[in-house]
Image (spheres, grey):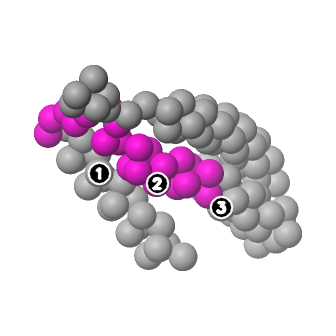
């Protein structure tokens, strides 16, 4: 699982690096933006998985390195993941709407 996520993170890093090197016509971004929408839409599933793992296993056998109660730390963990999940859902919706708007743009014919 970590290897797959690392590979995905590296792919995003490479895409970001490419994006820094210049501009392309916005119509040409349609396919790349579609891939980004798919990526962002899939992230909330992993966040929910992490939350399920925390709830299923609980704090039994865990030690917080700051001395704080492990159960309290898990509650904090789940709260932050819930906020992240919500943000990812909103980002996916917004990017999807942007992708849909872009789908209506094309280049004018040369003879127009």
Return the residue found at the far left.
Answer: 21
Magenta-drawn stretch contains 83 = no
Q: Inspect the magenta stretch and tell me whether residue 26 lies in it.
A: yes
How far across and down, in percent of the image, does residue 106 sit?
A: 38, 34
Q: Residue at x 42, y 64 (%)?
A: 8
Is there CB contact under 8 Å for labels 2 and 1?
no
Please name the residue that numbered disc 3 is placed on. Answer: 46
Q: Disc 2 or disc 1, which is closer to the eye?
A: 2
Q: Considering the image in quadrants, where does the C terminus appear?
A: top left
Q: How many marks?
A: 3
Q: Nearer the viewer, residue 107 or 10?
A: 107
Q: Magenta segment range?
A: 21-42
Expressed as whole percent of the image width and height from the top left, the position of residue 40 reads 56, 49
SS type, badge 1: helix
The residue identified by callout 2 is 35
Percent across and percent down for residue 44 are 67, 52
Q: CA distance from mark 1 to mark 3?
A: 22 Å
Left or right: residue 65 versus residue 5 is: right
Q: What's the residue at 69%, 59% (across, down)?
A: 45
Query: 4 and 110: which one is in front?
Result: 110
């Amino acid at each position: 699982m970590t290897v797959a996520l690392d590979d995905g993170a590296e792919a995003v890093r490479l895409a970001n690096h490419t994006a820094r090197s210049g501009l392309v016509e916005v119509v040409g971004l349609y396919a790349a933006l579609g891939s980004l929408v798919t990526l962002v839409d899939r992230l909330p599933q992993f966040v929910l998985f992490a939350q399920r793992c925390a709830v299923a296993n609980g704090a039994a056998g865990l030690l917080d390195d700051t001395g704080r109660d492990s159960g309290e730390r898990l509650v904090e963990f789940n709260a932050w993941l819930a906020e992240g999940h919500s943000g990812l859902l909103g980002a996916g919706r917004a990017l999807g709407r942007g992708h849909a708007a872009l789908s209506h743009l094309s280049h004018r014919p040369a003879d127009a």
